[in-house]
Image (spheres, rainbow, N blue to C red):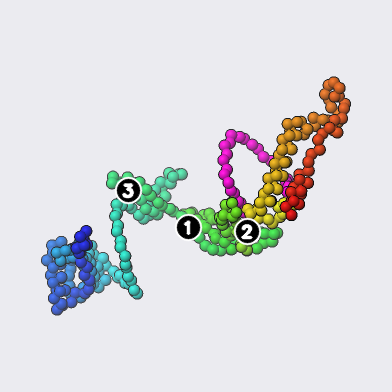
Amino acid sequence: MDKNGNVTMHKMSGVFQEGNKAHEALMNEIKSNKDFSHVKVENGQGFDLTSGADGKVATGTLVKGGVSQNLNQNIVRKGSDIQDGYFAKTGFSLQNLNERSNSGAFPIADPDTGKPITVQGKWFSDEKGNVISAQYTNIKNGEVFTAQKVTTGGKETWQYGVSKSQVGPDGKRVFSFKSVSDREVATGEFVAKEKIGPDGKTIYQNAEGGQNVNWYHQYMQHEKIGSEQSVLRPVVGFGTDLTNLQPWQMTAIRTGGQIHTGIEGSLKMTGLKGGLFPDKANNAGNLSGRNWKHLEPKKPSIREIVEDIVNKQQ
């Protein structure tokens, strides 16, 4: 159909039959067309033809006895083409192709050894024949749902999961196995990445929120084994969802942290931390040998401060 809505192409299909004048006219038209001189037209032959606006056959296919003939190319396809069942197409299809490609199994140079290896893939070239893109492989990829034995809680047990494997031409296998599920959700004001165990329970959660900006120029070595305990346990007990704390809990945490930081900072600045007032000072003058411990200010108890905040909220 052209831009004015006029039909420019017609589709015709059926089986050529003697005595059918329309069919005989089509057979004669094909036989008289020098472009189709290679085509053998006979009675009982199936046809699928397209004609132009002038009514003359432009292209199409003739099939009989397992032999398919293309009208506009000197191609004969032998064999069987069987369709069993119902087949239908509907809708609109528009294709604009600009492709020069080769596909199949070809030898290439191994990028590591330089020796030739055979791979399967598809290569795309430009107008001058230069390869501009390619995808190829020489491995077998497999993905199955299976089970593997693992030790958990001191006991061996079977866990089901997804196993992905790649097998090279030499038969060697590289695989990965995963029995936990991943979930990424928004909870409170945080984005939480969770690992879900085989029993459906969340066994690990990493939640982040706010804005994080860093600039580093450092070299550090860390060797640390130990445990850090917080005095804020009365505020946030074990099992509490840390991504959905109550306002009073957040206030208590911030207040406790600010007081602790302030005390630490003031002690460092005034020299009260680290023993500026030793039991046996080595300073010269009348400070020598004196005990100044009684002059140190008493440090506020963080636990007492936090417990006071908690009691006020209750």
The residue type indicated by label 1 comes to Asn
Q: Secondary structure at mark 1?
A: strand
Query: Would residue 257 be found to the left or right of residue 113 on screen?
Result: right
- Residue 56: where, in percent of width, then height? 15, 65
On residue 141, the disc is 1
Q: Sequence order check: which comes first, mark 3 or mark 1?
A: 3
Q: Sequence order check: which comes first, mark 2 or mark 1?
A: 1
Query: Would residue 130 be found to the left or right of residue 192 on screen?
Result: left
Residue sitting nearer the eye, 47 or 87: 87
Q: Secondary structure at mark 2?
A: strand
* Predominant SS of the magenta segment: loop
Q: Nearer the viewer, mark 3 or mark 1?
A: 3
Residue sitting nearer the eye, 108 or 159: 159
* Residue drawn at the location 31% of the way across and 72% of the way down: 82
The residue type indicated by label 3 comes to Ser
- Residue 58: where, in percent of width, then height? 18, 63
Q: Do the numbered discs 2 and 1 sit on residues whose CB atoms are within 8 Å?
A: no
Bounds of the magenta span?
Answer: 204-233
Q: Residues within 10 Å of mark 2 (few under 14, many from 20)?
A: some
- Residue 1: where, in percent of width, then height? 22, 62
Name the image quarter holding the C terminus. Answer: bottom right
* Residue 71 in sight here: no
Q: Residue furthest top?
A: 285
On residue 202, the disc is 2
Q: Sequence order check: which comes first, mark 2 or mark 3?
A: 3
On residue 125, the disc is 3
In magenta stretch: residue 214: yes
* Residue drawn at the location 74% of the way across and 51% of the way down: 312
Q: Do the numbered discs 3 and 1 sit on residues whose CB atoms are within 8 Å?
A: no
Q: Residue furthest bottom?
A: 19
